[in-house]
Image (cartoon, rainbow, N blue to C red):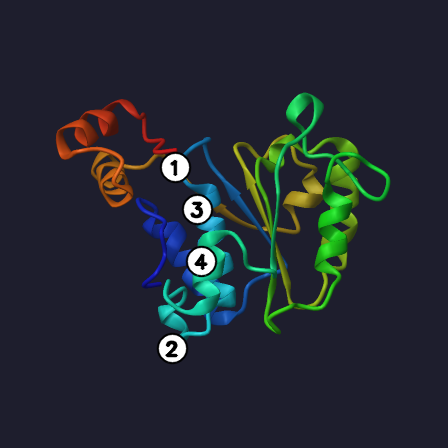
């Protein structure tokens, strides 16, 4: 996984690497405190599934066209959804609704892949899905579209229906180490070393 951007989660990265080698499940649940890198890992998984580099162990490579499109957030086969509207919830959505929601995501996954490869849906803050949205998603998880992977990023899994959790491969993420946070800040050019070291200590393991 030469081009993965995730830092401080070697076990989670190893689990993603194994999925890429043997074939990703239809649904993956990434669980951990807010700001530890769940969405970054989800994007790494998406890039790995769409990467065209060989061997598979090198995916995501970070340099092929697919990886670059995923990194820029413009790959046509990666569909993202997060909380929106009143109450900052992930809603059911659908035709005639003002806020994009789970039904819209499902409709996008039902389309043929634009690039001819996998299709990936990332639901950020999945613990914010309301009951209607969860019910709509459950129907898709019971019969997932061929070649599609749905990645749920949740700060906690308890708000999710047990039937949703049982249909997902679960990967847990914990706090990120101080040295790893320093590296993240350095790579992003966000702070000089002395400031990065101080920020890393007070981040509480949450670089986000």
Q: Earlier in the sequence, mark 3 or mark 4?
A: 4
Q: Secondary structure at mark 2?
A: loop
- Report whether 96 appears left or right of 143: right
Q: Which residue is mark 4?
A: 16
Residue 97, how many percent across, how many down? 82, 36
Q: Secondary structure at mark 1?
A: loop
Q: Which mark is residue 174?
A: 1
The residue drawn where x is 78% and y is 46% is: 103
Classify mark 3: residues with Cα within 10 Å, few (<14), some (14-19) or many (20+). some
The residues bearing labels 2 and 3 have C-alpha atoms spaced at a distance of 22 Å
The residues bearing labels 1 and 4 have C-alpha atoms spaced at a distance of 16 Å
Q: Nearer the viewer, mark 3 or mark 1?
A: 3
Classify mark 1: residues with Cα within 10 Å, few (<14), some (14-19) or many (20+). some
Residue 111, how many percent across, how many down? 74, 63
Q: Earlier in the sequence, mark 2 or mark 1?
A: 2
Reply above or below: 143 against 199: below
Asked if the residue under mark 2 is in contact with the one under mark 4, i.e. CB atoms within 8 Å, the reply is no
Residue 145, how many percent across, how many down? 72, 63
Q: Earlier in the sequence, mark 1 or mark 4?
A: 4
Residue 94, how many percent across, how many down? 81, 43
- For this rendering, which residue is in front, 36 or 197? 197
- Report whether 127 appears left or right of 190: right
Q: Which residue is mark 2?
A: 55
Q: Which residue is mark 3?
A: 40
The residues bearing labels 3 and 4 have C-alpha atoms spaced at a distance of 12 Å
The residues bearing labels 2 and 1 have C-alpha atoms spaced at a distance of 29 Å
């Amino acid at each position: 996984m030469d081009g993965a951007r995730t830092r401080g989660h070697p076990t989670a990265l190893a689990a993603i690497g194994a999925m890429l080698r043997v074939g990703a499940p239809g649904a993956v649940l990434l669980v951990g405190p807010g700001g530890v890198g769940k969405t970054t890992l989800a994007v790494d998984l998406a890039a790995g599934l769409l990467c065209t580099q060989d061997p598979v162990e090198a995916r995501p490579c970070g340099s092929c066209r697919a990886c670059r499109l995923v990194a820029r957030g413009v790959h046509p086969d990666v569909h993202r959804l997060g909380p929106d509207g009143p109450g900052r919830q992930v809603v059911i959505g659908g035709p005639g609704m003002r806020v994009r929601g789970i039904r819209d995501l499902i409709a996008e996954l039902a389309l043929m892949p634009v690039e001819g490869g996998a299709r990936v849906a990332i639901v950020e803050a999945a613990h914010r899905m309301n009951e209607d949205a969860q019910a709509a998603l459950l129907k898709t998880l019971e019969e997932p579209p061929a070649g599609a992977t749905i990645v749920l990023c949740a700060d906690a899994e308890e708000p999710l229906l047990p039937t949703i959790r049982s249909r997902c491969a679960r990967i847990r993420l914990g706090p990120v180490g101080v040295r790893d946070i320093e590296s993240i800040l350095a790579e992003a050019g966000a702070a000089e070393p002395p400031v990065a070291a101080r920020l890393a200590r007070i981040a509480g393991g949450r670089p986000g």
